[in-house]
Image (cartoon, grey):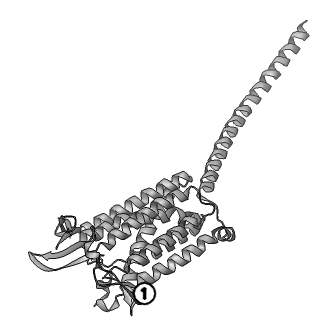
């Protein structure tokens, strides 16, 4: 399927094929490639932060494997639970090739994976969440361009902007320079077009600003957990606002689930950030990865020193009998010489 994406007020027009290439009759989608790129960049960011704190690379790899898997499972599970009526079998539920991944599910699944892995490895949970949170935002910035390639996650222009159960009039939006027009085309047949807000772009720009600010704040954080709370609050606020533009929101009754969760995350993140120091003091801190790495290095150093000491001791033991024998022979010779005289 192709998407013709236009920005009529700017005179821009793009024809985008959802399929990047085909291998053995298997279509590889641009969406999948872009998401993979986002994951790779996120892992690279975590490696960068982990190196600053002396966390071993193999430890980060363990985190990445578990977190990515749980994030994908969580994203799919969240989507399926909110669209149960769309599936005929279990195979349909686990088939992600036809789309259906929700970012909130990914955050929940990945977040639980980070917490559990930190506990298993006896590392500070809040510190690890601080390291991972900005990487998630970086992955989201990249991943939203997958929505562009799919011609999705936009907000159809209507007379109303929806905020929970209330609607607000929006006029003149079609004159905004960044307004887009999306036309679906399959085998040369046009299936319709819509003039829309580029909601994916709104969220991407919001996350980019947040990523920059959070990284500036990272150097000045006063307690573990503050970066994670800031991410939750920032993303929640942005998603709550942007969701009001979208026309493909998951809903329960008349409530847009992502908008409600965004609002809850904003309030919760703000409160947690406000009391972050007290929370950090109240959480039982397991040894940091740096402390673990230092302990391992110290252990290796002690082993090396022990080996050196053992070697030195062995050498001294070899020398002692030799010196004793030489002394005994010298005394014997002097005695014989004395008898001769």
Residue shown at the point (19%, 69%) measured from the top left? 8
Please determine whether, in this image, residue 176 is positioned above or below residue 317: below
Q: Residue 333 is drawn in which quadrant?
A: top right
Q: Which quarter shows the C terminus?
A: top right
Q: 111 and 15: which one is in front? A: 15
The x, y position of residue 310, in whole percent, is 69, 40
Residue shown at the point (51%, 76%) measured from the top left? 266
Q: 216 and 337: which one is in front? A: 216
Residue shown at the point (23%, 77%) measured from the top left? 195
Q: Is residue 215 visible?
A: yes
The answer to whether 133 appears left or right of 162 in the picture is right
Please determine whether, in this image, residue 52 is positioned above or below residue 331: below
The x, y position of residue 283, in whole percent, is 66, 70
The answer to whether 28 appears left or right of 257 in the picture is left
Q: Is residue 73 visible?
A: no
The x, y position of residue 5, in whole percent, is 20, 70
Q: Which quarter shows the N terminus?
A: bottom left
Q: Which residue is mark 1?
A: 164
The x, y position of residue 95, in whole percent, is 29, 79
Q: Residue 208 is drawn in which quadrant?
A: bottom left
Q: Residue 334 is drawn in which quadrant?
A: top right
Residue shown at the point (13%, 76%) measured from the top left? 186
The answer to whether 62 appears left or right of 181 in the picture is right
The answer to whether 160 appears left or right of 134 in the picture is left
């Amino acid at each position: 399927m192709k998407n013709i994406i236009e920005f009529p007020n700017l005179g821009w027009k793009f024809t985008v094929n959802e399929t990047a290439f085909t291998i053995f009759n298997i279509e590889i989608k641009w969406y999948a490639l872009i998401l993979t790129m986002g994951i790779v960049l996120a892992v690279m960011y975590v490696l960068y932060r982990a190196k600053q704190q002396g966390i071993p690379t193999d430890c980060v790899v363990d985190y990445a494997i578990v977190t990515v898997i749980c994030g994908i499972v969580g994203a799919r599970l969240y989507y399926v639970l909110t669209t149960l009526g769309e599936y005929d079998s279990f195979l349909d539920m686990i088939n992600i090739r036809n789309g259906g991944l929700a970012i909130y599910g990914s955050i929940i699944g990945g977040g639980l994976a980070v917490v559990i892995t930190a506990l298993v490895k006896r590392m500070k949970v809040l510190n690890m969440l601080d390291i991972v949170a900005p990487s998630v935002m970086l992955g989201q910035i990249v991943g939203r361009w997958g929505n562009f390639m799919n011609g999705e996650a936009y907000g159809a222009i209507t007379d109303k902007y929806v905020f929970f159960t209330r609607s607000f009039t929006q006029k003149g939006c079609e004159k905004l320079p960044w307004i887009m027009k999306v036309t679906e085309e399959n085998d040369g047949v046009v299936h319709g077009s819509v003039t829309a807000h580029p909601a994916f772009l709104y969220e991407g720009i919001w996350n980019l600003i947040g990523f920059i600010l959070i990284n500036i704040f990272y150097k000045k954080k006063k307690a573990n957990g503050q970066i994670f709370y800031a991410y939750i609050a920032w993303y929640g606020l942005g998603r709550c606002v942007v969701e009001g533009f979208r026309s493909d929101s998951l809903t329960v009754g008349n409530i847009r689930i992502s908008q409600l969760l965004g609002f809850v995350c904003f309030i919760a993140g703000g409160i947690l950030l406000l009391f972050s120091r007290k929370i950090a003091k109240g959480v039982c801190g397991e040894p940091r990865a740096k402390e673990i790495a230092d302990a391992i290095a110290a252990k290796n150093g002690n082993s090396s020193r022990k080996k050196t000491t053992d070697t030195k001791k062995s050498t001294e033991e070899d020398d002692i009998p030799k010196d004793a024998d030489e002394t005994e022979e010298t005394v014997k010779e002097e005695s014989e010489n004395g008898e001769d005289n």
